Amino acid sequence: MFARLRSLLPTNSRQYREETSQRITWGHWFTLFNVVLALLISSRYAFNADWPNTLSGKLYFFTSLFGHFSFIVFACYLLLLFPLSFVIKNDRTFRGVSVILATIGQTFLLVDTEVFKRFYLHLSPLVWDLLVNPEQGELTRQWQLLFVPMPLILLAEMLYSRWCWQKLRSFNRQKWGKYVAYFFLSCFTATHLIYAWADMTLYRPITAQKANYPLSHPMTARTFLQKHGLIDRAELQQEIEENGRLDSFYLNYPKHQLTFTKKPHSNIILINLSGLRNNAISSENTPALAEVSRKSLRFMQHYTSGDSRSAGVLGIFYSLSGKYLDSVLGNKEASPLMFAFRQSGYQFGLFSHNGFADPVYHQAAFAGILLPESKNNLDAISQWKQWVSERDVNQPFFSYLDLNLPQANTYEQQTKLLDWQFSEIWSQLEKNALLANTMVIITSDQANPTGEMSFAQQDMQVPLIIYWQGEVKQYDLLSSHLDIMPTLLTQFFGILNPLSDYSQGINLTAQNNRLWVLASNHNWNVAIMPDGEQYHIDRKGHFEKFNAQGEKEKSARPPLPLFLQMIQQSNQFVEK
């Protein structure tokens, strides 16, 4: 028995060394074949990823394609086939195992290209589990079609395996193999060095390609350079805050030119009471707000569009969730709502407690508009009162007031002070007899009083009160910041474009059949359910579930229809 076991183990005989050398040499040429095959399959990413708009970005795309997949295939050879060439002594068995492993790897790559095309994700345990879910028969059948090429891949691997083994001596005499290896090594090295340079210089056409390929982790040198004082960390961070993260995607927004059929003459005032929670409005704490809410349209299940104040503003003026914030900042994308106001000749009265310090205002939504400087709420309200008195009464206006919770010892005291400041605004509207022809929208970009980023229920649920010519109604269905812009563009401007051209929300005056609302940031997509439950899915396919109390619950996976809708809606305006 021990003799039989010994015969199966590697030996140090000359014959064994020669046979092992042959298997290793064959493995190199077999790996080269699979590099070429992987490059052919992975070329599908070129049709589905963000296509760079500069020559250097395009050159980097192909350099990284050659460098990344040649490295991945060669790494698989080193980790799997190279050790097996010493262990498996039978040549046919070794080649057979190699063919099977290569076929499986190439098939997974093919599936990943399709997953990336449909969901802008790469394969993960969650994504794989959902794709093969037997409860969704039609979807499963569609994905099973991707495995149809598997026998063809297996056949190609078998034919090349046999032919390469027969021609091994001829291959050994070839000199061009090492030049091909140098080429792929150069591409791999250049991929990481160029990305490190782009990350340091904030060159977005290259950094935006970070997530194009599976298992891609390009090198960055920012920490090293900061440590040695070669770049200024604070300056770099300020640049990112102003222009968005470097790996943000390109936008396809709006998808078509917007067309309007109405030129309204009504005024619109939007008051952002940042940090105000929906349940903070009461007759005791906020009598002025409570009184206005009783003679207005009140949305009781209203949520902001992300986990930050900037994301909330993005939802209001763009009808986009927080995931798109970096792309909007990077592209300096104009707001469709502000575009509609400009086209209709509206006057602008824009005032903020901090002079619109948030980049989403001065870099995007209000870009090109002279914005007044203010130091606090009272300063902004005073400037607004003066503007209301001096405006052209013959032209409609859009006014935006951005206020924050005043300084106080408790949240209750803060809301009382904010309510008093709001009453000053309302009194001015009544004094100037503006309420008869003015829609007043009262909301909050985020409910967290400190401005900390959070998807917690109490920080996401914000007030939405719309005063319009005495209409009174309480809405208990789900609504979102994503719905404000499409509602205004439909009701006031008669937009002809479908919602899918410019919005992730709905028209609140139409029938509301939604089962959840979307919120997001650069990493997480969140579905908020009517009962307060939340499903979180990140851009790598990881999943978390939280109950209405914000407690994390164990759950194997989200409902497949919800997952598909979340991914489709969250990627609605990603350039492909």
Image: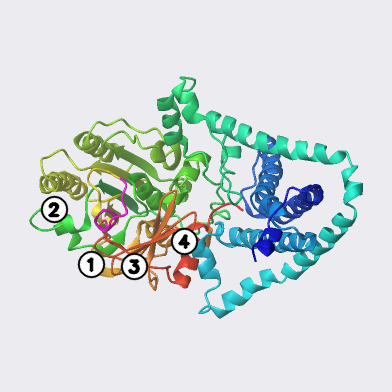
Q: Residue furthest left?
A: 284
Question: Of marks 4 and 2, which one's residue comes earlier in the chain?
Answer: 2
Q: Is mark 4 in CB contact (under 8 Å) with mark 2?
A: no
Residue interval drawn in magenta: 453-462
The residue where tag 4 is placed is: 494
Q: Mark 2: few, some, or many residues within 10 Å (few <14, many ≥20)?
A: many
| Amino acid type, callout 4 | Gly
Q: Is residue 130 above or below residue 38?
A: below
Q: Is residue 8 above or below residue 82?
A: below
Q: Earlier in the sequence, mark 3 or mark 2?
A: 2
* Pointer 2 or 1: first along the chain: 2
Report how far apart the C-alphas of labels 3 and 4 lie in the structure: 31 Å
What distance separates the C-alpha of mark 2 from that of mark 1? 16 Å
- CA gap, disc 4 to disc 2? 33 Å
Q: For mark 3, give the secondary structure.
A: loop
Where's residue 24, x and y in %?
A: 76, 48
Q: Secondary structure at mark 4?
A: loop
Q: Residue furthest top?
A: 229
- Residue 43 coordinates in the image, percent (x, y): 71, 52
* Residue at numbered disc 3: 529
